[in-house]
Amino acid sequence: MTVMNFEADGRRLLADLADPLPIAIPLDFNGPQPSFFGAAPARSEPLRSASFVGDTRESGSCNCEQVTLAPHCNGTHTECVGHVTDDRVCVAETLRGGMFLSLLLSIRPVPARTTAETSDPPPRPDDSLITAAAISAGLATHAMAGLSPRALILRTLPNSVERMSHRYTGDSPAAFMTRDAADLAARLGVDHLVLDVPSADRAGDHGRLTAHRTFFGLPPGSRRAQEATRAHASITELAFIAPTIRDGWYLLDLQIPAFLSDAAPSRPLLYPVRFA
């Protein structure tokens, strides 16, 4: 066991670093994989240059693959405010590493017709919504006196391994956040939001991306990163939180490659936390 002692919000805590819990979907370039928004599957192929072939099965000296993917659509990814602005903000420069005290909550989305919470454009009656009310109930259940999460991880119910290869198509293929839910996360001081759905917003929302803009602190319709009050924040989508991982407090290690783009494939890891 490798135990780290640390302090957060004046409380002494312990985290076991020996056995991280991965919540990213492994991306199989040659097998089933998730997809969103009509994107082609991610793929890889051997590099070919003159007489060289990057595949030992084809008599190459080594394996060297070229990979093609759309980070926003082909598996677990993390994005920054540059996702919705004309300014080219890079996620690797926004998210510089480190571990974040996080809270994992299981949330049961509700039909839009059963809640007063909304978004822009207004949800359709049968849309499935992640609400502020559900988040608030989870926070009350798992509150630790004096602790505030810097990351919020939401597992939507029912949960199924089928999500690891599901193709999300249509205008509303999965649950999405109400404006109230995104606003609550921002007001709580959550810097990093991790979701197991393909987008914080409805797929067919006429380009409003209300939950994204609310969480990043952008005015409605704004495309200027300078107008964001929370330009440091990040959103991770298409995670998969196995049923064996319990709700509660963790350290989140949000690993991404140094891509100079608004989003990158990511590998979030969780380390259980307990009082010292």
Image (cartoon, rainbow, N blue to C red):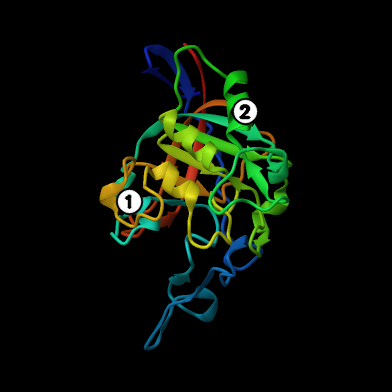
- Compared with 201, 142 (above or below) is above
Q: Which residue is mark 1?
A: 92
Residue 99 x/y as whole percent: 39, 33
Question: 261 or 124, which is in the foreground?
Answer: 124
Quarter-of-image position of residue 33: bottom right
- Compared with 239, 84 (above or below) is below
- Compared with 250, 183 (above or below) is below
Could you say whether the residue bearing mark 2 is in a helix, strand or loop? Answer: loop
| Gap in angstroms between the C-alphas marked 2 and 1 | 28 Å
Quarter-of-image position of residue 187: top left
56 left or right, relative to 124:
left
Q: Which residue is mark 2?
A: 247
- Looking at the rendered structure, the kind of residue marked 2 is Asp
Question: 186 or 246, which is in the foreground?
Answer: 186
71 left or right, relative to 116:
left
Q: Please give the name of the residue rendered at 65% of the width and 66% of the height, measured from the top-left corner.
A: 31
Residue 271 x/y as whole percent: 50, 30
Residue 141 x/y as whole percent: 62, 19
Q: Please give the name of the residue rendered at 73% of the width and 51% of the height, measured from the top-left corner.
A: 126
* Residue 150 in view of the camera: no
* Residue 258 in view of the camera: yes
Which circle's residue, 2 or 1, is located before the other in the chain?
1
Could you say whether the residue bearing mark 1 is in a helix, strand or loop? Answer: helix
92 left or right, relative to 54:
left
Residue 260 x/y as whole percent: 31, 59
- Looking at the rendered structure, the kind of residue marked 1 is Ala
Quarter-of-image position of residue 216: top left
